[in-house]
Amino acid sequence: MDNTLHILLAEEDAEAERVAELTGYLREELLELDVDDVTTLPGGEVPPGARAVDVTQIGALLVTLGSSATALSQVMTVIRSWMGRRHDTHQSMRLQMGDDVLELSEATDDQVAEAFKIFVQRHSPAGADQ
């Protein structure tokens, strides 16, 4: 089971400073969870296979989940809450664990909730509480 989650954040027409600030806020929230680490990737480093996007518009985090069976679920709850507070912007997000990628852009709250639920189920050990 892959133990790391790559998070790429992009906001339409955002300046690099704003994206860095927003990424920092999300990082602070994620560090409050039962995860091993949340690292800001330098320069909005784009993982292989990601669509080409202006790197000044990307914030990137690497979350090391640790051994907690509920860490991924907690992380996804925080990300969903964080996204929900930014309805006034056109943002997109790309989440990747191993070869599994979830990309969200212009999704409704219900669509985000369902996509996150499925993503967590695919990466949760059998029998773990979700």
Image (cartoon, rainbow, N blue to C red):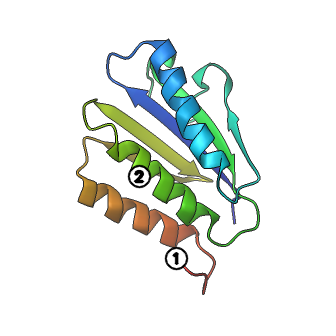
**For the point 43% across and 22% down, which residue is it?**
53
Q: Residue 73: name its quadrant.
A: bottom right
The residue to which callout 2 is attached is 80
Report the amino acid beneath label 2: Arg
Give x and y (percent) for residue 107: 25, 47
Of the pair 123 and 68, the residue shown nearer to us: 68
Give x and y (percent) for residue 43: 62, 19
Left or right of 104, for residue 121: right
Q: Residue 34: name its quadrant.
A: bottom right
**Callout 1 environment at 10 Å: few (<14), some (14 to 19), or many (20+)?**
some
**For the point 60% across and 47% down, which residue is it?**
30
**For the point 26% across and 38% down, which residue is it?**
87
Q: For the N terminus, which image quadrant?
A: bottom right
Left or right of 96, for residue 89: left
| Residue 50 visible within the image | no
Of the pair 23 and 103, the residue shown nearer to us: 23
Give x and y (percent) for residue 70: 62, 70
Mark 2 or mark 1: whose residue is earlier in sequence: 2
The residue to which callout 1 is attached is 130
Report the amino acid beneath label 1: Gln
